[in-house]
Image (cartoon, rainbow, N blue to C red):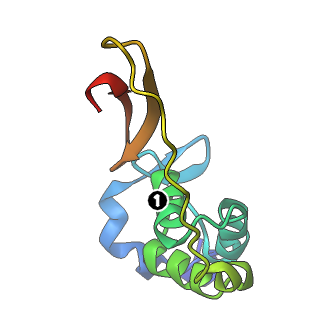
Amino acid sequence: MEKSELPFDPMAYWNFRSGLITVDGVICKGNKVLIPSVMRRHVVEKIHPSHLGVENSIQNASDTLFWPSIRAYVKAACEHCPVCAQYADQHQKEPMLSHPVPDWPWQYITQDILKHNSRYYLVTVDHYSD
């Protein structure tokens, strides 16, 4: 196959060539699927419907997908999203909720899941020692 017959510019991937593999005919970089330029806009539309902001969208994309300059591409897409622009300045603060003080430890606990740097943590709070 000639360079002109390729569906993408191979030079854009030159710096990553040693890390590229094929799995069942799909080009990957490690465990991330390489997305050709013609599919990027469609893929970003699929990962951005919740409008969770730039950093969450970048994280969602880069966890499983790869292409050169993926961060810049997703950031630009989010910054040009009309829904995100409409609600960007409307940061609503939730009111503080008051809970009764428990009489003994572990009588009243709450838990939540926290994601940080692609790792998940279970956070537990004992309201006795609040």
Q: Pinpoint residue 11: horizontal percent, then vertical percent.
A: 42, 81
Q: Nearer the viewer, residue 99 or 14?
A: 99
Which of the 4 image quarters holds residue 23?
A: top right
- Residue displayed at 26% across by 27% down: 129
Q: Pinpoint residue 21: horizontal percent, then vertical percent.
A: 44, 50
Q: Is residue 50 left or right of residue 67?
A: right
Which of the 4 image quarters holds residue 127?
A: top left
- Is residue 33 at least partly visible in the picture? no
- Is residue 122 at least partly visible in the picture? yes
**Vertical position of residue 125 compared to residue 56: above or below:** above
Q: Nearer the viewer, residue 121 or 8?
A: 121
- Residue displayed at 32% across by 11% down: 104
**Vertical position of residue 19 compared to residue 9: above or below:** above
Q: Classify mark 1: residues with Cα within 10 Å, few (<14), some (14-19) or many (20+).
A: some
The residue singled out by tag 1 in the image is: 59
Which quarter of the rendered picture does the C terminus lie within?
A: top left
Which of the 4 image quarters holds residue 94?
A: bottom right
Which quarter of the rendered picture does the N terminus lie within?
A: bottom right
Q: Nearer the viewer, residue 81 or 85?
A: 85
Q: Is residue 65 left or right of residue 121?
A: right
- Residue displayed at 72% across by 69% down: 45
Q: Secondary structure at mark 1?
A: helix
Q: Pinpoint residue 97: horizontal percent, then vertical percent.
A: 52, 45
Q: Nearer the viewer, residue 119 or 42?
A: 119
Identify the amino acid type marked 1. Gln
